[in-house]
Amino acid sequence: MTEIILFYLFSGLAVIFSLLAIFLKSPIKALLSLLVTLLSLAIIFTLLGAYLITMIHIVVYAGAILVLFLFVIMLQGLGASDTPLFQRFSKPLLFSLLLAPVLLFLIFLSALARSPKLLAASEKVHGTVEAIGRLLFTDYLLPFELTSFVLLLGVFAAIALAKKEPSS
Amino acid sequence: MIPADHAIILSLVLFSIGLIGLLIRRNLLMILLSIEIMLNAANLLLVTGSYIHGNLEGQIIAFFVMVIAAAEVTIGLAIAILFFRLKKSVDTEKLDLLKG
């Protein structure tokens, strides 16, 4: 019972703060709203039995990605501010832009409504460090090793892109 | 027991919100932020799938999605810095270098 109450509470928080994240004008406020969304999602992951994923989620998103965003916004200062919504789009255009995601949501929802009732597995899944680690180092060893390559390429690309050009 | 279909609906709602943000924002950083919301919605769907089927495969894929998201946001922010250095702004309306 407690689980269900926590689930609905943090689902509501995640939806409200993600809406704030996309509609707030100031980038810093939007970023902090995203932080609340991410932490609510972390709690939902725990409720669904993904313990290791929760911890990685907090470390990678709240720890690394948000700080990276914060640094870039800080570096750019006032240049990062956005024009108000109604100056960017005319009202009919804005309406159609909002309609497209809503229609996509309704298509997904109708697909979900037609499928048979989804229930949780009879035995609860436990994504502990041991269980995930065992899978990662046996069945998923090749993809796991390739992720290190992807991260290395990401670092190289970021350094090569953001390097100061020699002034000519 | 958490209702699994409600978790799926939550992930659909978050994905749609991310898509709205992607469409209505004109700031390069906020577009990247909306992509993060969409990736998180996908992760929630994967973890829910793992919860429904009672095996760990979905959580492993969610782990790989996080790694890709970290690499993606690094490169995206590097491009944003580059663009800001060029134009002193991150407004996508000014992103017209390839326009003839």
Image (cartoon, rainbow, N blue to C red):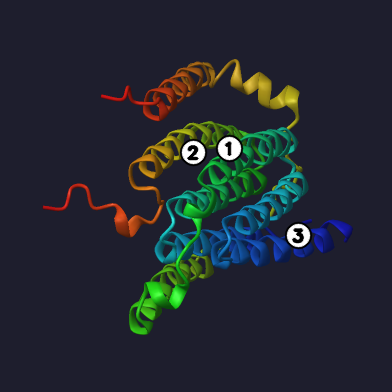
- Identity of the residue furthest to the right in this view: A2
Picture coordinates of residue A166 (x, y %)?
Answer: 32, 22
In front: B80, or A136? Answer: B80
Picture coordinates of residue A61 (x, y %)?
Answer: 63, 40
* Residue hosting label 2: B73
Disc 1 marks which amino acid?
Answer: Leu
* Residue hosting label 3: A10
Q: Residue at x 31, y 59 (%)?
A: B93
Disc 3 marks which amino acid?
Answer: Phe
In contact (CB < 8 Å): disc 2 and disc 3: no
* Residue hosting label 1: A68
Picture coordinates of residue A67 (x, y %)?
Answer: 63, 39
Q: SS for tag 2?
A: helix
In contact (CB < 8 Å): disc 2 and disc 1: yes
Q: Write down the chain letter for disc 2.
A: B
Q: SS for tag 1?
A: helix
Whether marks 2 and 1 lie on the same chain: no
Which labelled disc corresponds to residue A113? none
Check the picture and name the quadrant holding the C terminus of chain A. Answer: top left
Q: Residue at x 58, y 37 (%)?
A: A68
Res. A52 image quadrant: top right
Q: SS for tag 3?
A: helix
